[in-house]
Amino acid sequence: MNAALFQYLLRLGDTSLVLGQRLGEWIGHAPALEEDLGLANLSLDLIGQARLLLTYAGEVEGRGRDEDALAYFRNEDEYRNLTLAEQPNGDFAQTIVRQCLLDAWQHEVYTALSGSSDARLAGIAAKSLKETKYHLRYSAGWLVRLGDGTAESQRRAQRALDELWRFTAEMFVADAVDAEIAAAGIGPPLESIAAGWVERVSAVLGEAKLVRPTDVPYSWHGKRGQHSEHLGYLLAEMQSLQRAHPGAQW
Amino acid sequence: MSTVDNEWPLFEVFIRARAGLEHKHAGSIHAPDAQMAIDHARDVYTRRQEGVSIWVVPSTQIVASDPADADALFEPARDKIYRHPTFYAIPDEVKNL
């Protein structure tokens, strides 16, 4: 059980961490000062979630690894985040589409986990859900404005959606870890959160006047450690200081 | 004007620090519309728990007095010091006035 829970916590924590790191890349580059702060706020929320989840993962693993050991001293193939989270920022539309798809997923997951049989995880989920509700309001709000905005913003939003949609199948493909977690009452069966996610995302896309792309049967396997080519570069930047100066503190 | 105006409109932001207090002017932000202005105000002005409620008002909707009229508007109050309640003897037993 502990092995499955460890993997499950890494999947949640790594997805938040990698997405938070990606959003941090916008700092100083966002289209407006207000968005600079907005994206940084999302980033800090997500990194905060990752800290709680990875700290717990380290305790479950029982090998003395803390949040920093897990964040800075695991290689690409040891990361368990959803492949979607590591996709590049692209333009603002691509960042918003990626964010909205993942916010809607986290909304379903954290809602379900708030009632987890694991009290510690339920507490982390309840805290994270409050943050996620704002994240979704932000990203869905922007997606509607981009999709239902100018011809240029509509074109970019649809292009980003077409590019990123293929990574969403991974959210709902259960493997042995997911099955064990669901059987123990710790996490939701993935098919149960898929329906809520589809409904929520479809509503946003409808309001945004964007066309939902066709589902692609091929699923990506970031949560098994098989990543796209983008994660390695992200980790190299994020981990370089701790790798060069292990244990360095502010 | 031949140039396209790409600037977002400006909104004035008012924050209520705690329940029971009034909203106070905190500053201004740019946003594409009123709803997004609330989100921007939240991200820019309430990051350190500064508030429990936000108002935003389009800056173009603020009607302001003209600084050139300041003499006519505010000078006449200067010599009416009797409007300040400073001519009353305060009884010793009244504290904290």
Image (cartoon, helix red, strand yellow):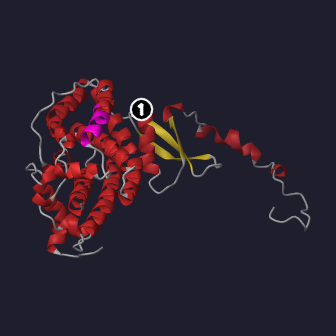
> For the point 22% across and 24% down, which residue is it?
A211
As displayed, is residue A158 above or below residue A132? above
Tell me the quadrant of the picture where the N terminus of chain A can be found.
Answer: bottom left
> For the point 12% across and 63% down, which residue is it?
A75
Look at the image and tell me whether residue A54 can be seen: yes
Chain where mark 1 sits: B
Frontmost residue, A57 versus A136: A57
- Residue B77 quadrant: top right
Tell me the quadrant of the picture where the C terminus of chain A can be found.
Answer: bottom left
- Horizontal side of B63 relative to A162 (left or right) equals right
Say whether residue A133 is magenta. Answer: no
Say whether residue A197 is magenta. Answer: yes
> For the point 35% across and 40% down, which residue is it?
A136
Image: magenta residue range: A190-198
- Horizontal side of A226 relative to A10 (left or right) equals left
Name the secondary structure under disc 1.
loop
As displayed, is residue A140 above or below residue A89? above
In x, y percent, where is residue A87?
A: 16, 46
Secondary structure character of the magenta stretch overall = helix
Q: How crowded is mark 1: few (under 14 residues within 10 Å), some or many (20 or more)?
A: some
Total marks shown come to 1
In x, y percent, where is residue A96?
A: 27, 39
Frontmost residue, B71 versus A43: A43
As displayed, is residue A230 above or below residue A150? below
Residue carrying label 1: B33
Look at the image and tell me whether residue A28 can be seen: no
Frontmost residue, B28 versus A35: A35
Residue type at the position of mark 1: Asp
In x, y percent, where is residue B11?
A: 47, 38
In x, y percent, where is residue A10?
A: 23, 58
- Residue A214 quadrant: top left
